[in-house]
């Protein structure tokens, strides 16, 4: 069965009560989790949006898996904004137009 593509924007903020060293520990955990998801093929593309956050394209089985992945991210509790939208590739449509 083909996967479902999601465009996911994640915006995080360092809490005022978390010192820089602890924050860098969370960032390192997040980077490791992101790399693992990319290596598994769950993240197809990922971009840093300067001054905003991260935009990633995920390829997952369904919305439940997308929710599970987002809930399990180390930086999850520090996200100030999360948006996840199902997307589809228009390339084949354009080729046949």
Image (tube, rainbow, N blue to C red):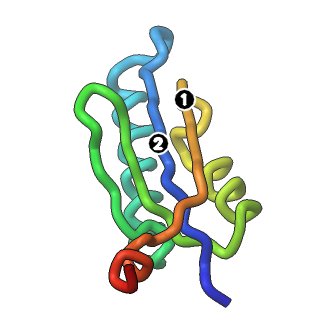
Q: Is residue 53 above or below residue 7?
A: above
Pick whichever, 50 or 87, lies toward us: 87
Q: Residue at x 28, y 44 (%)?
A: 48
Q: Quadrant of residue 97?
A: bottom left
Q: Quadrant of residue 45?
A: bottom left
Local SS, label 2:
strand
Q: Residue at x 23, y 32 (%)?
A: 50
Badge 2, how many Cα within 10 Å: few under 14, some, many 20+? many
For residue 5, side relative to residue 28 (left or right) = right
Pick whichever, 75 or 58, lies toward us: 58
Pick whichever, 75 or 85, lies toward us: 85
Q: Are marks 1 and 2 in contact (CB under 8 Å)?
A: yes
The residue carrying mark 1 is: 81
Q: Residue at x 56, y 36 (%)?
A: 82
> Which of the labelled discs sits on residue 9, or is there none?
2
Seen as rendered, the residue at the extreme right is: 64
Badge 1, how many Cα within 10 Å: few under 14, some, many 20+? few
């Amino acid at each position: 069965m083909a996967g479902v593509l999601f465009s996911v924007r994640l915006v995080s903020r360092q809490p005022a009560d978390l010192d820089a060293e602890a924050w860098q520990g969370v960032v390192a955990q997040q980077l490791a989790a992101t790399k693992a998801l990319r290596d598994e093929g769950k993240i197809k593309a990922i971009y840093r949006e300067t001054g905003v956050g991260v935009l990633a394209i995920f390829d997952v089985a369904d919305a439940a898996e997308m929710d599970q992945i987002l809930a399990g991210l180390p930086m999850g509790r520090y996200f100030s904004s999360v948006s996840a939208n199902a997307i589809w590739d228009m390339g084949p449509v354009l080729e046949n137009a």
